[in-house]
Amino acid sequence: MSDRQKHYVTVDGNEAAAYIAYAFTEIAAIYPITPSSPMAGKTDAWSAKGKKNIFGRRVRLVEMQAESGAIAAVHGALQTGALATSYTSSQGLMLMIPTMHRIAGERLPGVLHVASRTVGGHALSIFGDHSDVMNCRQTGWALLSSGSVQEVMDLGGIAHLAAVKGRVPFIHFFDGFRTSHEIDKVEQMDYKDLEALLDREALEKFRADALNPEHPMIRATVQNPDIFFQIKEASNRDYASLPDIVEEYMGKINEITGRDYHIFNYYGAPAAARVRVAMGSVSGCIEETVDYLNARGEKVGFIQVHLYRPFDVKRFVDAIPATCKSIAVLDRTKEMGASGDPLYLDVCAALRGRADVNLVGGRYGLSSKDTTPSQIAAVYANLKAEKPLDSFTIGIIDDVTHLSLPETEKLDLSGDGLVACKFWGLGGDGTVGANKNTVEIINSHTEKFAQAYFEYDAK
């Protein structure tokens, strides 16, 4: 780690993402949608006040008529050699998918920061899960996951850096509300450090390929069966090399911050017999539960997924302890009618032929349903069974299809030295603002680390 002076700020996940995105963005095309709106709002405010990006220029911001227009503006900006960004969630992201296919196919380094949110099905929900980003798996965009406000600050820049160097667009996503609206005291990345990591040669090549009436070119043609298939497959090498680029940038971020990020981060007992796989904000809860269980003689571990697409099979397999006998994969989405949920199916594919590992999958946290250490412990307990329940759920009582795991014990892992307070407020009574101010005061004027999270009701 460098000997630079640490600078702490009190921000939520949205502000952390906006701060990082602003550094690399020349054009931001926006259309607000909960819970991603503050990213666009911060960008707009900073631009209006003349804040400069790493290129010494103010971000040019344009608000479109809908998310479909926002992604079209991003597409157009990228075609002219400008680095472009947008911010969205849920139904907004769904409107972007057709153009996202084009951006990926044309190998343009666009970036979307997504406060991941439930896609409306049987009902509309403004709350968080991974159903929106999972709809984007086939678009060709890389998917990079952050699990906390600090990770958003540390890893958000990798999406921009790797997009330029790897010529693949990125979605950087984090859990709606649970991360996007959680206020935390985090170490802030310095724009000078980020600027030093940018591959200027790759950037200049991107700019040189821009559409320009002074040197016209044909792009995005209509193709027939004689060549379409071959050209589609020609991108294989670049996607295969992208995990190496991301891992390289993670190593550079590690040097700056002193933290230890990898595409797949293993946490827990070196000789774990039972391992679980997940991504997003549940990671902190799992790590605390792993510590609790291992301190009591268990041998359990956890693999946190950061780069979900492209899915690096070799690095994933290498992250699994050789002693592992059973794995539970947690998805924060439900794919109706499928043989398994998305992350689970990727793990199945990665472990095909491994008869020595018992693999099950389950779901948690849909529409911001709380996930507790007791529920995490229940998943590890399920892996002890002779025939562990597959396609299970935690956090609910399923009295219809009977797939929920029972909680065998109530765990309180708050530990010593922690002060936790719960406040109730009615809309407009000032409770949220007062608590935000309190956290800011504690973090700014003491050595303590204060955190705040607000549960809203959409009714």
Image (cartoon, helix red, strand yellow):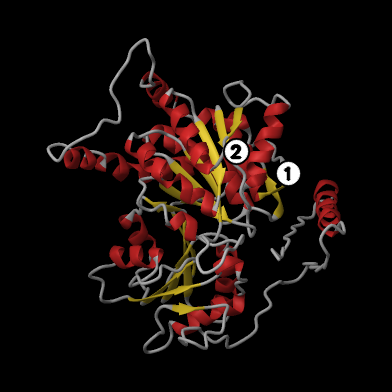
Q: Quadrant of the N terminus?
A: top right
| Secondary structure under the numbered disc 2 in the rendered image | helix
| Secondary structure under the numbered disc 1 in the rendered image | strand
Task: Tell me where residue 116 sits by quadrant.
Answer: bottom right
Which residue is drawn at the image coordinates 63% and 34% (left, top)? 190
Extreme-top residue of the structure: 214
What's under tag 2, amino acid-wise?
Ile
Query: Residue 360: x, y in percent?
Result: 38, 76
Which residue is drawn at the image coordinates 59% and 30% (left, top)? 62
Left or right: 229 in relation to 379: left
Left or right: 287 in relation to 402: right
Which residue is drawn at the image coordinates 38% and 37% (left, top)? 103
- Total numbered badges shown on the rendered structure: 2
Crowd around label 2: few <14 · some 14–19 · many ≥20 (10 Å): many
Circle 2 is placed at which residue position? 20
User: Tag on residue 85?
Assistant: none
Which residue is drawn at the image coordinates 43% and 37% (left, top)? 163
> Toward the viewer: 235 or 314?
235
Task: Tell me where residue 7 sits by quadrant.
Answer: top right
Extreme-left residue of the structure: 226
Q: Can see residue 457?
A: yes
Upstream in sequence: badge 1 or badge 2:
1
In the image, residue 377 sits, relative to residue 265, either above or below, namely below
What's under tag 1, amino acid-wise?
Val
Left or right: 417 in relation to 78: right
Query: Residue 305: x, y in percent?
Result: 45, 58
Query: Residue 376: x, y in percent?
Result: 55, 76
Circle 1 is placed at which residue position? 9
Q: Quadrant of the C terminus?
A: bottom right
Query: Residue 181: x, y in percent?
Result: 68, 54
